[in-house]
Every structure is written in structure tokens, then in C-alpha cells.
Amino acid sequence: MLFRLSAIASVFSASLAGDLSTADGMYCGSGKYWSSLMFIVNSTDETLIASGIANLPYAAPWYLSNISIHMNELGDEIVIGKAPKTREPHSIGGFGYRVPSWTQVNFDVRTQTISATYKDTEMRCTPDQCPEHLPSPHDDRSSLDGFYCCSSKYWRDFFFRVDAADGTLDISGMATLPNSAPFYLSGIPFSTAKDGTVIELGVNGHQSRALRHTIGGFGYPVPSWTTLPFDANTKTITATYRGEKINCTPEQC
């Protein structure tokens, strides 16, 4: 009799193992890097929704949906599958592409053109491509002062704003991807080469800091997990980011 009960218990335990429905629901948490982290498990569709917002000023929320998942055999780990090709990565907020980082850009005083290469595309920005609401092109063609605008395969509404008096440069643009936020970097120090054909961008730590204090962007790289530990007894999903373990539970939502 005891053997039979033991056998039944073993079969019952085995039936629970790998059952994704035990994790159904919404789980929330926060930590050092993320002021809000949320998971929604849907066992019917075998999908996961993940969202979060960085613990930094002006950070935009990121949102990933339709992430394919299944439970491991022990029932203590949610295994994340490959992202579907049709899913838009980072569908809410974010810059879409890595923000440009140049040490120098080229300037043609004759055509009043600032040119720079991003990935495989050369961007040629001129004052006459700027919208009407921006200041008109300057009359002194020997001066760098003013706005230089353009668009490309990767960026739209892209501009350089040169302030020769302060010796600083502003750069802004918006990716040609859905729902992208504009980036804006200001006060970048610059100098020009002796022949005036090259604008050398200074590095004083401002550029790296500026991304954290601008509009849009996720603040930190969006997490990419292959597994998420799950405790069925406490209904807890544990997510690790940069060494920090974030315990997410329904009660915190």
C-alpha cells in the first residue's frame, strides 16, 4: 500500500514538472539598475512579456512581447526561446540604433557641408536641408556657425548645430525605425584642422554622460536572458542583471 501511494506521488510530481501554467501571471520587481521590472507569463500561448525602466533620469521604458518560452523538466526555470523574426525589438522608446560616436567629421566650406559616415552610409548635412523653423543659413560662408541637416538610411531629422563662439557642437537625430526616440547630445567641444576641412570632436567625458541625461533611450542595455529561475512555492521569478538578482513577485505589481 505504501509502495502504491509512493508510486502515485511520483507520477503526480512528474506531471507537475515542466508545467508552465504554474508560472502564469504578472511578476514585478525593482533593483539597483531598474526602477521597474515586469514579466507576464502566458502558458496558453507559451509566451512572455517583459518590460522595464532604468533607474536613471529621463529613461524611456522598454517593452518586449511574444517571447517564446517553456518550463524546464524540473519546473524551476523558465527557458527563453529565440525571438521571432517578426517582432520589433525594443518597441517602446530607445534610440533604435547605437548613437553615433565620431572623433572627427569633414567640412566643405565651399558647399557648406558637414559629412560623416555611419555604418555603411555617408551622411552629407547642409543648411538648406534644415526645416523652416530652424534659423536660416548664415550669410558668412567662411563661418561654421549654424545648423546642418540631413537624413540617411539609418537616421532622419538629423542635424549638427555649430556654435563657433563657444567652440561646441550639438548633435541630434531620430532613427528610421518605428517608435524610436530622438537622441540629443549637446556641448561637445570641437576644434578645426588648420585647413578647415576637418572638425575634430573633443572627448571630455561629457558625451558618455550625456546619454544618461537626454530624452529617450533606455539608460542601460536591454536585458537578454536565456533562462529565468522560477520558484513555484513563493511564485517568484528571479532575474539577474549585472550581477544583481531581482526577485519579481505578483505582490509587488
Image (cartoon, rainbow, N blue to C red):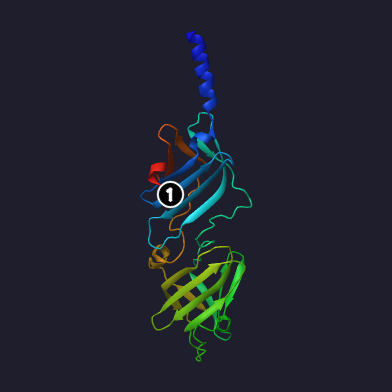
In front here: 79 or 21?
A: 21
Could you tell whether 222 is left or right of 122 in the image? left
Which residue is depicted at the point 56% across and 46% down? Answer: 67
Circle 1 Cα neighbour tier, 10 Å, few/some/many (<14 / 14–19 / ≥20): many
Which picture quadrant has residue 119? bottom right
| Location of residue 68 in the rendering, given as x and y in whole percent from the top left corner | 58, 43
> Does 215 appear above or below 236?
below
So how many labels did they put on this image? 1
Could you tell whether 245 is left or right of 127 in the image? left
Which picture quadrant has residue 213? bottom left
In front here: 79 or 103?
A: 79
> Does 87 appear above or below 231?
below
| Location of residue 188 in the rendering, given as x and y in whole percent from the top left corner | 42, 72
From the image, tell me which residue sits under label 1: 37
Evaluate whether residue 246 shows in this view: no
| Location of residue 121 in the rendering, given as x and y in whole percent from the top left corner | 61, 68
Furthest residue in direction top, as rendered: 1
Evaluate whether residue 36 shows in this view: yes
Secondary element at image label 1:
strand
Furthest residue in direction right, as rendered: 86
Could you tell whether 246 is left or right of 227 in the image? left
> Does 203 appear above or below 67?
below
Circle 1: residue type: Leu
In front here: 250 or 183?
A: 250
Which residue is depicted at the point 46% across and 57% down? Answer: 61
Could you tell whether 150 is left or right of 252 in the image? right
Which residue is depicted at the point 57% across and 69% down? Answer: 155
| Location of residue 210 in the rendering, given as x and y in whole percent from the top left corner | 40, 66
> Does 13 appear above or below 154?
above
Furthest residue in direction bottom, as rendered: 139
